[in-house]
Amino acid sequence: MNININSLSQKYSVRKLDENDVDIIYDMSCKNDIFYQYHLPFVTRESILDDMAALPP
């Protein structure tokens, strides 16, 4: 199933995240202490890349 990502929002710019976004994702995620207190393991750059590879595009 192909989704036209550009059609997901008329208000916001939407794009697919890729390896170039890992540092931004990590910086946002690692500050969420309460989430990772209950949802181990703590996020790493490697775990973000693993999730990107494991999840459907």
Image (tube, rainbow, N blue to C red):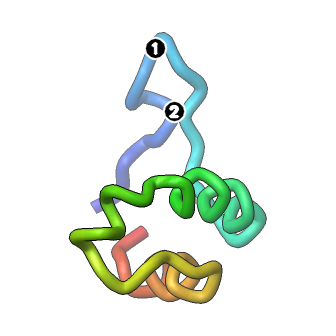
Report the residue marked by disc 1: 10
Q: Does 55 sit above or below residue 18?
A: below
53 relative position to 37: left or right: right
Mark 1 neighbour density, 10 Å: few (under 14) some (14–19) many (20 or more): few
**Most foreground residue, 24 or 52:** 24
Q: Quadrant of residue 54?
A: bottom left
Which residue is tagged 2?
Answer: 6
At 49% across and 84% down in the image, what residue appears?
A: 53
Q: Secondary structure at mark 2?
A: helix
In the image, farthest residue toward the left: 38
Dot 1 amino acid type = Gln
> Viewer-proximal residue, 26 or 51?
26
Tell me the kind of residue under disc 2.
Asn
Residue ID at (45%, 54%) = 32
**Contact, CB < 8 Å: mark 1 with mark 2?**
no
Residue 51 pos. (x, y %): 44, 80
Expressed as whole percent of the image width and height from the top left, the position of residue 2 reads 36, 56
- For label 2, count other residues whose C-alpha is less than 10 Å away and answer few (under 14), some (14-19) or many (20+): few
Q: Give left or right: position of 45 versus 38.
A: right
Residue at image coords 27%, 62%? 1
Compared with 35, 55 (above or below) is below
Using the image as rendered, state which of residue 21 and residue 29 is in the foreground: 29
| Quadrant of residue 56 within the rendered picture | bottom left
- Tag 1's secondary structure? loop
Tell me where residue 8 appears, x and y as whole percent. Answer: 39, 30
- Residue at far top of view: 11
Q: Is 53 left or right of 55, judged from the image as shown?
A: right
User: Where does the C terminus fall, quadrant-wise?
Assistant: bottom left
